[in-house]
Image (cartoon, rainbow, N blue to C red):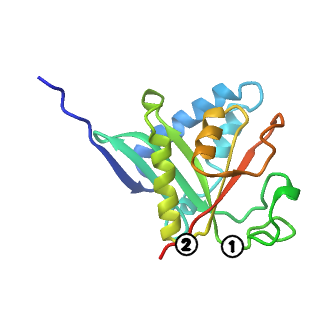
Amino acid sequence: MTAPASTLTVRWTDLADPLVRPLLDELAYEYATRYQGILAVDQIRDELEHYPAAEFAAPDGALVLLLEDGEPVAGGAFRRRVEPELGDSARRPRAEGRDEAGLPTVPTAELKRIWTHHAHRRRGLAARVVAELEQRASDLGYPRLYLTTGPRQPEAVGLYLRAGYTPLFDPAAEATGPLPFEKWLEATS
């Protein structure tokens, strides 16, 4: 007898959804483990709760979960970015999307909280989450995406490079802080 195939579904939701809690809890644990001695647990929790929940909700944001048999296995979110950009200012194209202070002059969606449950990694789920977020951001009219990851997250760096994101830092240099990336979306008809 063959075991039934699991069902993977996409769920657009918000931070109040109880299925989001495992995402945030596991992210906090992951960051605490990878950045032990650099970031305190309080700093990590502050970062995860830094932005109000409304920023990850319509009309300017979104949060997606991938559910397998009803359980969260991956997820991520985006919000409208308004902060100055990180990265080497000399590498940023000035005419396309940022003013002299580094503020986005075009609507920019910032991807946040990209996560895959530890028991479900190496299945392409994070790439699926990124693709879902990119499509939703495009549908909302964002021409540009932005994100950062950390220097102790080489899997994330690889994911974003494979997904066509441009590093706004020198990948050959030793990184000590956030690693910013951007991606310009193709116009949809």
Residue at image location 74% in from the left, 73% down from the top: 105
Task: Give the structural element (helix, strand or loop) at label 2.
Answer: loop
Q: Residue at x 43, y 27 (%)?
A: 119
Q: Which mark is residue 122?
A: none
Q: Position of 35 compared to 186: left or right?
A: right
Image quadrant occupied by the N terminus: top left
Instruction: Decide which of 162, 169 is in the foreground and name it.
Output: 162
Q: Left of 101 or right of it: where is 31?
A: left
* Residue 20 left/right relative to 51: left
* Numbered label attached to residue 106: 1
Mark 2 or mark 1: which is in front? 2
Q: Are marks 2 and 1 in contact (CB under 8 Å)?
A: no
From what the image shows, is residue 147 above or below residue 46? below
Residue 21 visible, this orientation: no
**Place of residue 29 in the rendered image (x, y in percent of width and height, measured from the top left):** 58, 30
Distance between mark 2 and mark 1 Cα atoms: 14 Å
